[in-house]
Structure formats: C-alpha cells, structure tokens
Image: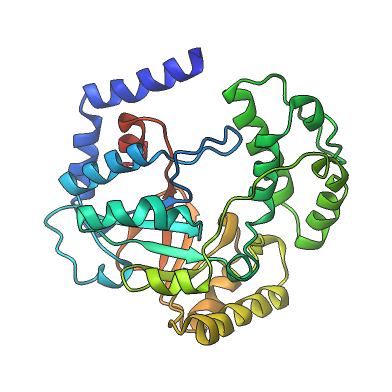
Amino acid sequence: MFRKFAKDLYYFGLSAFHADQARIRSLAQGNNVVVLNLHRVSPIENAFWPPMHPDVFEELLIFLRDYFTVCRFDQLLSASNERPLAVISFDDGYYDFLQHVLPLLDEFGMQANMNIIPECAETGMPIWNVRLYDFLNAAPRNLIKEIDLPGFDFELIDDSRAAKLKFGLKISSFLKKRPRLEREGLCRSIEHVIAKTAFELTRMMNADEIKHISEKTEIGAHSFSHDSMGFENNEFFERDFAKCQEYFLEKLDIPLSIYAFPNGSYRAEQIDFLRRSGIEHILLVDEKFADKRSDVVPRLTIYGESKNEVRMKALGF
C-alpha cells in the first residue's frame, strides 16, 4: 500500500512541477520520436503481469492527442515537426487488441503498430511466459511454492499485488535469459506443478483477425516463436526470420517491413542481417527515445495504473 502511495505521489509531483511540459518542449526539437511499447489492454486483472486497464489507455490517448502527432512508422519521415512525434507499438498479438484497443484508436483517429508472433497466431496458444502468468494468477500460493527451478530461489512471500508482480517479473526474467533449449528444459521441470490446477489461457489473434486489423494497423513480426535472440546463434535467428517471411507471404499476404526483437534481446550482426533482408524498421526496447531518420528504433515500455503514471512514463520518466 505504501509503495503505491509513494509511486502515485512521485508522478503527481512531476506533474505538479510541470516536468511533463519541459520534456514535451525538448522533444519538439530535432528528430525525436516517442515510440511507446505496449502489450495487453484489458479490464481482466492479473497481478503477476498486469495489463493496462482500458480507462488508463484512454487517458494515454487523450494525452497523446493533446500534445503529440501520432503516426505510423511509414509516416515518420513525412510527418510535420510542429509537435513531438509519437508511435504506438504493440507486441505479441493478443485478442484484447481487437476488443479494447482498436475501438479507442478509431475514436481518437489514431493508428498503431502490432508485432505478431506467427506461432501463437497458428496454435492459439500464448507465449510460454504468458501461459506461466496465467497459471500463477489461478494457482494458490501453496501450489506456487512447489515450483522448483534450479538456480531460482525467489519466493512468493504473500498474496499482495506487489509481491505477485515482483515474483512474476523475477521468474520471467530468470527464464528469458536462456537459449530456447535450456529454457524449455527448465519449463518441463515444473509442468507437473502447472498440471495441478485448471486455468484459462490468454487469447491470441488468429491469422484472419490479424489480416482484418491490417487494414488500419501496421503489422510487424515479433519473431516466429518469441525467443530471446541475443542468446541464440545466428543460424537459429536466420531460420526463425525465414519462417516469419514465409508466414507473412503465405498466411497474411502482408509485406514484412517491421521486425521487433523479443525481450529486447539482440546482437549487432542480427540487425545487419535484417537490413540486408529488407526490413525497414528494426524495433528494440532500450528504454529511450528514437530518431525518426534511423531504421533502428528504440522504444519505451509503457504500463501503469493512473493517468499521471502513463503520462510521465510516455515522456521517459
């Protein structure tokens, strides 16, 4: 409770002292672009990986409408610099984009970028860490305590929202920082625990739904299976990318010009490969502002529970 109060007070203080206005003025100078990286927008709570509530997302759009020119990646070079530029970039391809995001984007006259994971679109299954979050959200604490991952000794200390969020981030980070084969072996070691409770999986968009949103939304690839490419060899990365190209050509009939690295994990030679393969916008995380002239695009991870929080995080605070 104190942690939330302190956080709210911090963002309120930034707003009260007009830190946002100073940052907006500085962003209007030069070739800066604020690229906001989002994932889920939903009223359904999951304390281990909280989605942004639609009401908070609407507050974010109000802020962007009032102070920014919101455009797509393919519009950046031609966009006016009279106001700061912003791009709204979603990863993974959750169905709640159709339910809660597109209606609000339409209402505000905005468009976004969505980077999909072909394997999830084909199987209907979310990525491994989201399946894990779905399990954690449904399981009692005594069952979660049965998780035994070699090298992972962090515990869920209580049932508070803060403790659950911290545990979710810790276990996901622990598993993300491994090559796929090693991660899959670790995940198999806890399957017997996961099988002890029934839970609903987060819904993903399928190919037809992705084609439908492509009429208004810039579609990119978020790898084929959402692996951390900085931990994989180049042969693995290039095979994975070839599968993305094939999927976009055969299943979506959409040109592939945008690629977003999963988990912000990449190596310099992989960026060079994407350039040689015709990718025009290479999306990272890196938590900093982008330059509209560059094909390598850092993004700011954006989430929050209040208007002040998302407003300030969108400005890099």
Instruction: Say if 21 sits above or below 95 in the image.
Output: above
Residue 34 versus residue 244 in the image, above or below: above
Residue 127 position in % (x across, y down): 65, 57
**Which coloring applies here?**
rainbow
| Residue drawn at point x = 49 percent, y = 12 percent | 2
Q: Residue furthest left?
A: 82
Left or right, 263 with reference to 36: right
Residue 54 relative to residue 83: left or right: right
Which residue is drawn at the image coordinates 23% and 47% (left, top)? 64
* Total residue callouts: 0
Which residue is painted at 51% across and 63% down in the image?
205
The image quarter containing residue 120 is: bottom right
Is 10 located above or below residue 173 in the figure?
above
Q: Considering depth in this image, is 128 or 300 the residue closer to the camera?
A: 128
Q: Is residue 26 visible?
A: yes
Asked whether, in this view, residue 217 is left or right of residue 42, the answer is left
Q: Is residue 16 left or right of residue 233?
A: left
> Would residue 295 be seen by someone viewing this image from the given angle?
no
Relative to the observer, which residue lies in front, 59 or 96?
A: 96
Q: Position of residue 136 (x, y in %)?
A: 69, 37
Q: Quadrant of the C terminus?
A: top left
Name, please, the residue furthest toward the top: 2
Residue 43 location (% of width, % of height): 44, 38
Determine the residue positioned at 41% across, 49% down: 288
Give residue 119's quadrant in the image.
Answer: bottom right
Q: Where is residue 243 drawn, in percent x and y?
A: 63, 80
